[in-house]
Every structure is written in structure tokens, then in C-alpha cells.
Image (cartoon, coloured by chain):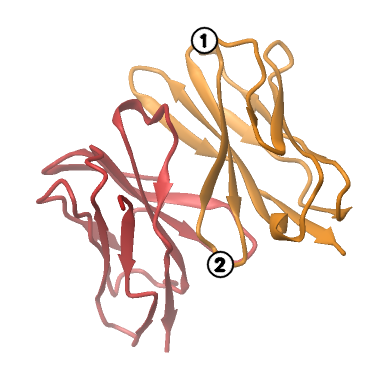
Chain colours: A orange, B red
Amino acid sequence: AQTVTQSQPEMSVQEAETVTLSCTYDTSENNYYLFWYKQPPSRQMILVIRQEAYKQQNATENRFSVNFQKAAKSFSLKISDSQLGDTAMYFCASSFFSGTYKYIFGTGTRLKVLA
Amino acid sequence: DGGITQSPKYLFRKEGQNVTLSCEQNLNHDAMYWYRQDPGQGLRLIYYSQIVNDFQKGDIAEGYSVSREKKESFPLTVTSAQKNPTAFYLCASSGTGDIYGYTFGSGTRLTVV
């Protein structure tokens, strides 16, 4: 069965510092996509970054980047120069293809950026 | 601007009452989804639809019903059979194959009074 696991329920980071959120997944499929979503206190879920499993190059979006380790089935999110507005729940998710695409969310990591 | 609109933002339900949550998208997305989120929890899939006039149960469909008569609309009805409906409900949509990620609405907070 496909799974997505976030082992850090809560984290905190000082403003302007760098933080890494962990995510591991398990699948026997070769065709899949990985995502990080942000849910701020407003509760609107926003797509932060996306990684295609067949691409070795790590995705980057401004201050957000991923460390994709396919063999280890790891997909961590690095936030550089953390800002107060980064305070949110972060969900890792994956879309696995097995006849049809199946989307699975992790349980989330609550990140608090401290002033 | 393209996006997903959920309404109402807050909804109160009396015991034994059915209520309907609205979800409309103008992104021309084929697939639409309903998720439930309890406090401090992740997302649990209620129902999804990949094409008009077709939908499938997710992991927690009991006590809920949906329809997909138009591509743009995917309303969710919380029936009286749902014994613990107080939660935050999120609607999402995606293009074919979910490979580009979901676009989410702003959610509906449902409370039983």
C-alpha cells in the first residue's frame, strides 16, 4: 500500500533561519508526483512546490526547495530565510499512478516561525 | 480569476438536519474532491468525481452524499446519518491525472448546534 509519513508533528524556527520538514513515502510504483502544501491560519490550502519522480533535479520555488532522495523515498522541504508568514501547517502529498492516480496526504507538520 | 468558491464559510446544523455545502470551480478541471479536516488532523477523503455524472466514495463517505451534474459544481450534502459532522470541509479540483496538484477552496466550517 502507498503511504506518506510526516514524523514531525510540530516544529519551530527563528525568523530568518532555515528549517527542514521531513516526509517519507512508500510505493512500488515508478510513476508518481510529490507535493508540499501550506495551510496558514486562514485554512486555505496552497500548493507550495511540486516534484516529478522521474526528475532527479530538486524543485525550487523562491525560498522553498526540496531534497528528493528517490532511493530513500524521502521528500523533505527546506524553507530558507523563514518569515513570520510561513507559520502554517505543512502537508506532504503524493499522487501515485496504479491504473489511476491516487492522491495521499501526510498528517501534517505545524511550523511556527518565532520573531 | 480562476479558482474554487466554497460557500458558506460558516454553517450551523441542528441535530437531524441535512445541510448542503457548495463548491464551484471555473478552472475547467475535470476532477473534484471533498475532504474533511478535524482539529489538528490531516485530510480525509469523503467523495471524489473525475467526470460529470460520475463520482466515487472516498475513505469516509458514510453519512455524506454528492452530485456532479455540471463540470463546475460538486455540492456535498451532510445528512442526518453523519453522527459527528462538526469539522472543516475542503473542496478541491485538479486537471487530468492529479499530476499538477490540487487547487483548494477556502473551506466551510460546519458546527452542530
The image quarter in which residue A78 lies: top right
Q: In this view, does A78 lie to the left or right of A26?
A: right
Instruction: Provide the residue designation for mark 1.
Output: A30
Q: In which quarter of the image is the C terminus of chain B?
A: bottom left
Mark 1 or 2, which is nearer the eye?
2
Is A96 situated left or right of A28 in this image? left
Q: Is A36 placed above or below A43 here?
A: above
Q: Which residue type does callout 1 highlight?
A: Asn
Q: Is residue B14 left or right of residue B42?
A: left
Residue underneath mark 2: A42
* Residue A22 image point, x, y percent: 76, 35
Residue occupying the point 51% across, 13% down: A29
The residue depicted at 59 percent of the width and 31 percent of the height is A3
Question: In the image, is residue B42 above or below residue A21?
Answer: below
Q: A7 or A109: which is nearer to us? A: A109
Looking at the rendered structure, the kind of residue marked 2 is Ser
Q: Nearer the viewer, residue A69 or A58?
A: A58
Tell me the chain of label 2: A
Q: Mark 1 falls on what kind of element?
A: loop
Neighbour tally class for label 2: few under 14, some 14-19, many 20 plus, Cα within 10 Å: few
Residue A5, label in figure:
none
Q: To which chain does the residue with label 1 belong?
A: A
Q: Is residue B52 at all visible to an observer of this figure?
A: yes
The picture places residue B93, in percent across and down from the top left corner, at: 33, 44
CA separation, marks 1 and 2?
35 Å
